[in-house]
Structure formats: C-alpha cells, structure tokens
Image: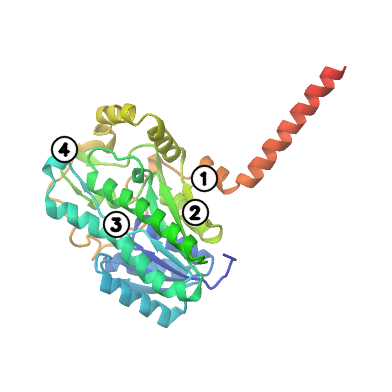
Amino acid sequence: MKRNRRRVVVITGASAGVGRATAQAFAREGARIALIARGRAGLNGARRDVENLGSEALVLPLDVADADAVESAAGKIEKKFGPIDVWVNNAMASVFSPIKEMSAEEFKRVTEVTYLGYVYGTLAALRRMLPRNRGLIIQVGSALAYRGIPLQSAYCAAKHAIQGFVDSLRCELIHDKSRVQVTMIDMPALNTPQFSWVKSRLPRKSQPVPPIYQPEIAAEAIVYASHYPRREIYVGMPTVGAITVNKFVPGLLDHYLARTGYDSQQHDGPEDRHRPDNLWKPVDAQKDHGAHGLFDSRAARHSPQLWTSMHRGWVAAGALLVAGALLTHFFRRESE
C-alpha cells in the first residue's frame, strides 16, 4: 500500500494501551482515524491526541463483542471519512486466574471480546474491502498465539484462535485472487494499563512477563505493516524466542513455565480482589488511562530486533557485503 496522508484507519481497543499509541502514530501521518472502544473518557482522550497532532478522529463507543454494533460503526465510518483503508483489530479482555477457578461465563466473555471481536471487525472490513478489491486488515496478535502460559488460559486460547482464523482467511483471499491483505503482528509483553484493570485472582499484583516493552514499539510495527504488509511480523526477541523454542522443545517449555510462569506474572504487593475490572464494563468511563501502564521504569523504548526486521533488506545487503569482503581477504591471503 502506498503512503497516503489521508488514509482512513479503524482501530479497536483505541482508548488505551497499544490502540492508543497506534492512534497517535497514525495521526502523525495525517490519517483519518476511527476510534472504537467502550470507555468514553479514554476515547475522548484518544480523540484529543489525534486532533492535537493535526488529524481527524471519529469516536465510536461500543463493545466489539456486539457484531451488529461493529457493522453499524463501519457504515458510520465510511459515511464520514470514506472507504476504509486499514482496519486494526486490537481490543482485548482477559482474566488472570488458574483454570480451576475460572467460570464458564468468564471464558465466554474473553472469547467474545478477544477472538470474536476480531472476527466481527474482520467481517465488517471485508464487506467493504472485497468489492473494492483493496484494503488491509491488521490483527494484533501475541507470542501467546503460539505458546500458552499459565494463568492466562482464556486469553491464550483466544489468541491461538485468531492465528488459525487468519491462516484460513489468508488462504481464501489467495484463492479468490483478492488484493485485500491480512497480516498478524505478534507482540511481546507491553507496558499497558491492562494490568491495572484486568480481572485477577492472583495473590499479588499482575505484571507483564519481563522483558517489557513500551506500547509505542507495538504501534511502530503496526504502522510499518500498514505500508509494508507481510504475512506475519514478530516484535521483540522474547516473541521470536518463545515461538521458536516452542516449535522444537514444547515439553521442556511446559516444565520451564510451570516453574517460572506464576511468579513472573506477579510483582510486589498483594492484589486487591475488590478493585474494579473491565471484563464486563469499562473502568475508564470516567478516567483516561492513556497508553502506558505502571512499568515505565522497566520498559524498553526500542527493539533492535524490530528495527532489524523492518530493515531486513539493508541488513541482508550489509551481511553480503561483509561476507564478500571477508572472502576477498581470504583469497588474497591464500594467493600470497
């Protein structure tokens, strides 16, 4: 997709975290951005971010688990801004809990938001993109789409489902010779506000599994993919490592996570079991939480792995030049 200062971009889960950082990143390019989430305070904050960066925003408060609401929103977006160029599925819900303490309703709710919310967004985008034979759907995935971890079973299962859904969709688009594209971006642990509002039964406060990255790194990958879509993009060495190790020694990883996965998802201080959570309703209805969580001091602002992935052509060319220089030096020495 060529760069276009006036692209129309839809972002679900836009009120905070990755969605919020992504809205800011697209606004810097001048995109016209539709912001979808439940929390009005966060959505209004995201709109101010976009407008302060000189772009336009449309706020659409809705629950992505409501297929009719998502479809209606897509119609409103195109009526105001014109054809949708990029649809970013990002909204999520989770529960930090052992499986044996989970309820059926909690599994259902996480699935409806984190998996079916992506399906509904994709369907709404396809209904508009396929007749035009253009457009891009970006699925914000995770290393957990390939490797489940303890205490996040519902979320891991939903991310696995997204990965399978994307593979099926991609095959069908290829079969139909459609120019509509789909890409999945697999994220590492990110410093987002979700750890302050996700429902939790953990004894201590929840945290992203270190190493932690700032959400702007995720936004950078998303915006890059909107211009240079690939089949899939891994963000951060922990993502690459988790997916790669799981391919070869999943049993060993089972035992490693059984030993370390509980403690690594918790940090200092007991959890308040009575704090508000966002599983059924937003906790930012009155408060704007922004893009960042509580872990700024521990979160990396750059990812050498992502930089390398985004510049892999130059990296490959540099490697070839170095290899050529070494071979030339070797043969010269041999001929002396």
Mark positioned earlier in the residue sequence (1 or 2)? 2
Residues packed near mark 1 inside 10 Å, few (<14), some (14 to 19) or many (20 plus): some
CA separation, marks 3 and 2?
Answer: 23 Å
Mark positioned earlier in the residue sequence (3 or 4)? 3
Element under disc 4? loop
Element under disc 1? helix
User: Dividing the image into 4 quarters, which one contains the C terminus?
Assistant: top right
Q: Which residue is mark 2?
A: 220
Q: Which residue is mark 4?
A: 203
Residues packed near mark 4 inside 10 Å, few (<14), some (14 to 19) or many (20 plus): some
Q: Could you tell me the amino acid type at mark 1?
A: Leu
**Where is residue 96 drawn, in percent x and y?**
21, 44
Q: How is the image coloured?
A: rainbow
| In the depicted structure, whether residue 268 falls above or below residue 78 | above
Q: Could you tell me the amino acid type at mark 3?
A: Tyr
Mark positioned earlier in the residue sequence (1 or 4)? 4
| In the depicted structure, whether residue 269 falls above or below residue 20 | above
